[in-house]
Amino acid sequence: MKTKLLSLLTILPSLLLSYELEFSKSFSKDIQNDTLNTNITIQIDSKEVAFINEKIEFFQDFINDDLTVTKKNGNYNLMPQYSYHNNKQKFIGYRGSLHYIIETPKYEDLNKFVDDINSIKNNMNSKKVKLSVSNLRWVVSTELYEKNIDAMRIESIKWIKNYIQKIDDGCSIKNITINKNYRNNYTQRYSKSVMMENSSSRNITPSQTKQSIVLNTNYKLQCK
């Protein structure tokens, strides 16, 4: 009995001296915006669905065949349009809308793409066809963003290993939780929506800026 009691008294101090250390640290990095981004919308109003589909298909073929830019989130909607007078609804036709996000690292390619699609619109010589170009901006491409996030993950793991060596208290890593922040990618905008009529696109590019990305890391250490 006395031997068991002595053994217990020997273990207890060891248990009392062990502890968990939990804290957070943020890692940040500024990276250069590398991709120019804009939205384009082709809008066609007509009472004839065949007319709308014909024009939309013409634009669609051009967009699909152009390999100088990247096209994202393409969608097409056809909706009936109504006017209202004295609480009465009157059918006035249909509206077809084709929308794309266009991206490229080269401003010259984007400018040519917009010029070409604007020429197509002008050659149709119809007030029923409208083209809008909006939110010209520099963004960080997904590839560059993920590459830097991966590098920051490695940095955060190396940091905690060095930290453990410095405190020299018999600590080991119990858990690491890494949370990347939501990236506000659209940091540099140029003007508002521009309705393209009979003029070509402007040869003006927004300033290329840097964007800060943040990695929040939570550490839990077991120390003796």
Image (cartoon, rainbow, N blue to C red):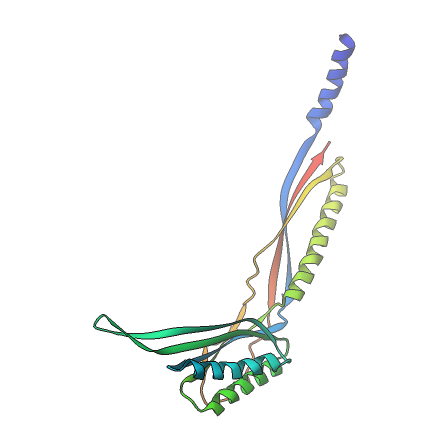
Q: Please state the horizontal and vertical placement of residue 4, each as a whole percent of the image.
A: 76, 12
Residue visible at 70% across and 27% down in the picture: 17
Q: Residue furthest right?
A: 3
**Residue 202 visible from this viewpoint:** no
**Is 42 positioned to the left or the right of 220 in the image?**
left
Q: Quadrant of the N terminus?
A: top right
Q: Residue furthest left?
A: 86
Q: Please state the horizontal and vertical placement of residue 164, each as a whole percent of the image.
A: 74, 42
Q: Please state the horizontal and vertical placement of residue 7, each as a whole percent of the image.
A: 77, 16
Vertical placement of residue 104 versus 169, above or below: below
Q: Residue furthest front?
A: 50
**Is 217 positioned to the left or the right of 206 in the image?**
right
**Is 53 positioned to the left or the right of 3 in the image?**
left
Q: Quadrant of residue 65?
A: bottom right
Q: Quadrant of the C terminus?
A: top right
**Residue 109 visible from this viewpoint:** yes
Of 40 and 8, the residue lying toward us: 40
Residue visible at 46% across and 72% down in the picture: 77
Of 135 and 30, the residue lying toward us: 135
Residue visible at 37% across and 74% down in the picture: 80
Q: Residue furthest top?
A: 1
**Is 48 positioned to the left or the right of 86 in the image?**
right
Q: Please state the horizontal and vertical placement of residue 109, each as a whole percent of the image.
A: 62, 82
Q: Quadrant of residue 215?
A: bottom right
Residue visible at 40% across and 82% down in the picture: 48
